[in-house]
Amino acid sequence: MVSECGIADVLRVVAMIAGEQSDSRVRTGVIDWCPEHGWLNVTDKVLASLIQKYPLVRVKSELASAHEWLLDNPSRRKKHYYRFVESWLSRAQKSGQAYNGGFKVVDGGGF
């Protein structure tokens, strides 16, 4: 039985990782996803870049939530996973700004 995430996909991601390690800049557009393995090519550099870009977001937790969403919605799977992750984290960032870590932001003083 051939899995959805075939050997060619895994080899392509390994080649991208090897290329990134020789390259000093962060290559963020190469994030991939597979139902059996989850997020692929989310290196420490990519993760650090996402954490810096979205400071109000728990990036690892949101990536886990996005993984579950992809598993639960197979008919709505994406082709450009980096763009999907950026959109997901952007929405989480906006939510974090609105609620400030669980506490609703209120103008004015007092209780």
Image (cartoon, rainbow, N blue to C red):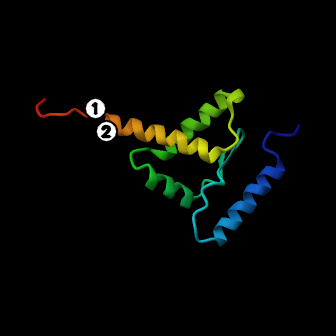
Q: Position of residue 7 (x, y in %)?
A: 83, 50
- Residue that mark 2 sits on: 100
Residue 107, quarter of the rendered image: top left
Residue 74, quarter of the rendered image: top right
Q: Relative to residue 97, is residue 80 drawn left or right?
A: right
Residue for point 63% across, 71% down: 23
- CB under 8 Å between callouts 2 and 1? yes
Labelled disc at residue 104: 1
User: The residue tagged with tag 1: helix, strand or loop?
Assistant: loop
Say few, some or many: other residues with alpha carbon within 10 Å of mark 1 (under 14 / 14 to 19 / 20 or more).
Answer: few
Residue for point 49% across, 46% down: 59
Q: Position of residue 77 (x, y in %)?
A: 69, 34
Say few, some or many: other residues with alpha carbon within 10 Å of mark 2 (under 14 / 14 to 19 / 20 or more).
Answer: few
Q: Amino acid at mark 2?
A: Asn
Q: How far apart are the two marked residues, 2 and 1, measured between alpha carbons?
A: 6 Å
Q: Relative to residue 107, is residue 81 drawn left or right?
A: right
Q: Residue furthest left?
A: 110
Q: Is residue 55 above or below residue 84?
A: below
Q: Amino acid at mark 1?
A: Lys
